[in-house]
Image (cartoon, rainbow, N blue to C red):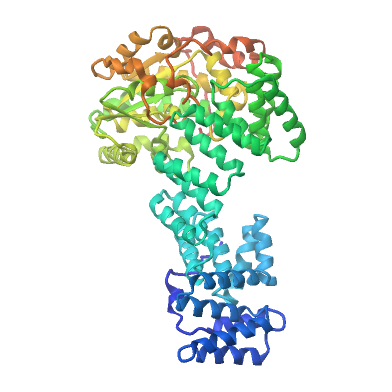
Amino acid sequence: MLPLLAFKPGSAEKHHKYITPAMEADMALLPGQSDPDIVSRLHAAAARFETEPEAARAELEALIAEEPDCLPARRALARMLRHHGELQRAGIIELEAITLGLQRPQFVKAQTAFMAGNLDAAEPLIRAHLRSDPEDPAGALMLGEIAAKVHARKEAENLFGRAILLAPAYGEARLALARLLRDQGRYTEAIEALTGLLTQQPAHLSALALRAAILVQLRRFDEADRAFEEIHERHPQDARSWANHAHMLKTVGRQADAITAYRHALTIAPSHPQSWWGLANLKTVRFTPDDVEKLRKVIEEHDGAASKDDHIHLLYALGKACDDNDDVAAAFEAYSQGARLRLQQVPHDPDKVTEHVHKSTQVCTPTFFTARGGWGSPAPDPIFIVSLPRSGSTLVEQILASHPQIEGTEELHDIERIALSLAPTGGTGGWLDVLPTLDSTKMRELGDHYIDATQRFRHTDRPFFTDKMPSNWIFTGLIAAMLPNAKIIDIRRHPLGCGFANFSQHFNWGINFSYDLSHIGKFYTAYVRQMAHFDSVLPGRIHHVTYEDLVENTEAEIRRLLDYLELPFEPACLRFFENPRAVYTPSSEQVRSPITREGMERWQRYEAFLGPLKEALGPVLEHYPNPPPKPRHHPQHPRQVSDR
């Protein structure tokens, strides 16, 4: 891609003439607009603007009436109206000018390529268009969107800003800017951009929805709730907004309200996939036989017509509905169909995980850690909770977050970001090649950076906080090296229970190993091997909990857990289900209730279908909860690790 045009915010404000050379050039771009008389009339109107503004305005309006396709006249009139404070009328004219400009052949060609996703073709076409008409807001917007797609964020921001300066009423440009700012974590600025848009167009659905989503990301749930209510008031038939509101209500523990919102979305759009999937993720909701029939009908009617993502959501919801109605075979078939489709979207190579663990055992040896004694950040704040998904990590976090000295945050991505920063082109496994080369100063810097970066998630003065990203087990060596005083808790669940729980859960992002039973078994095996390695290399550093023990002997396990953390026992940890904190995982509903055995043996109903999982687990299944005996010789993995 060529360097982006050096548009800078504010450049549009430098035009003092109301008929600019670029506007004159517009004449050659629309059929029949090269008439010298029209150019003369435009200049005459501009000359009379200061002394006879009403006459100038009348001349431009007359010209537009006579020549409706005269783009320069509309742009000039919009500027004159805005100058005189007639903002509403100016905005109307600006949008009319943009609509007119979209019809030009050169723009149409660029837009066709852009909409087809062919950025390599769209970019030179829109550049050529902007060279002939540098004051086209729609052209600036399109080039900005291309810049955003290739992660040229500063250039995209400048281009979106230019489009807004050229046409302040251009809502699409303000929305694009807000999305860009949101994606960069600049939430306050994004809301400011949306406020400008909503001031002009209070009912703009996309702007209202984005504002609500940002408020949820900021954990400003009361404001987000009001934002969703405003959407419902202005757009009562928008099923997507009802579903998104339900997602938020689930997160903050308003389960009954969440169910009502999902069900309301389905009265508006009976086939709405996100709503069916959302209900399925509310684990205590039980689908009725009528729900099963509705889902079957929706899937049959939309098979081939719905997007693949929608189809996957519906299949997993059907699996849950069949499970609730004890049709195990139909449930497993629905889960399997959804998993096959999802695996096509997110291919997973289980050998890469095995290779990564092998490399970890070769790098992170006793000698490695002995040589680095005293390195890293001394901060004791983090408590890492690692596991496979659906193993009980959310439950452990909820218990710990009920202790007055521990703040529960969420699944943080900062450890993986740090690992990737060490080897940006080497994939997730590349950090293991770099780790032995780091000196004590760099190791301390990495640890301190993690502590600083995670401050944005800490909203209390509690001295400790949880990082409940399950996949951080991959980075155990990095954590141990750069944060030697951090605690690491490993929570694991019976491999068949954990495996089937992953297979039957559509996570919608990441967790790519979970869509094939064999892949799940190999992933679990790699995880057990890595944890056993670090137990031998750093004895006592990792505290192990099994989900089954936590369910059967809750108080004893909580006391053992707090002893490891060197914290006093706190009775509130036994009443973790009363903790009102927001919970973002699929287990959000379950951890708001006392511990029960319900669901612990759910996998047994499906055991006949779990052959590939059992085979992949091998001795790990036989020896659970202990790791299998260490083989005398590890398999060699000659391929370079480039991903986890």
Q: Is residue 396 visible?
A: yes
User: Which residue is the extreme one toward the front?
Assistant: 233
Q: Nearer the viewer, residue 340 or 61?
A: 61
Q: Give percent across and percent down for residue 275.
A: 60, 34
Q: Give percent across and percent down for residue 601.
A: 55, 10
Quick one: quadrant of the N terminus? bottom right
Asked if 24 appears above or below 394 in the picture, the reply is below
Q: Give percent across and percent down for residue 597.
A: 49, 10
Q: Give percent across and percent down for residue 238.
A: 60, 44
Which quadrant holds residue 551? top left
Q: Is residue 350 visible?
A: no
Asked if 459 appears above or below 155 in the picture, the reply is above
Asked if 451 appears above or below 317 in the picture, the reply is below
Query: What residue do we see at 43% from left, 79% from top?
Result: 14
Residue 270 located left or right of residue 366: right
Q: Nearer the viewer, residue 619 or 598?
A: 598
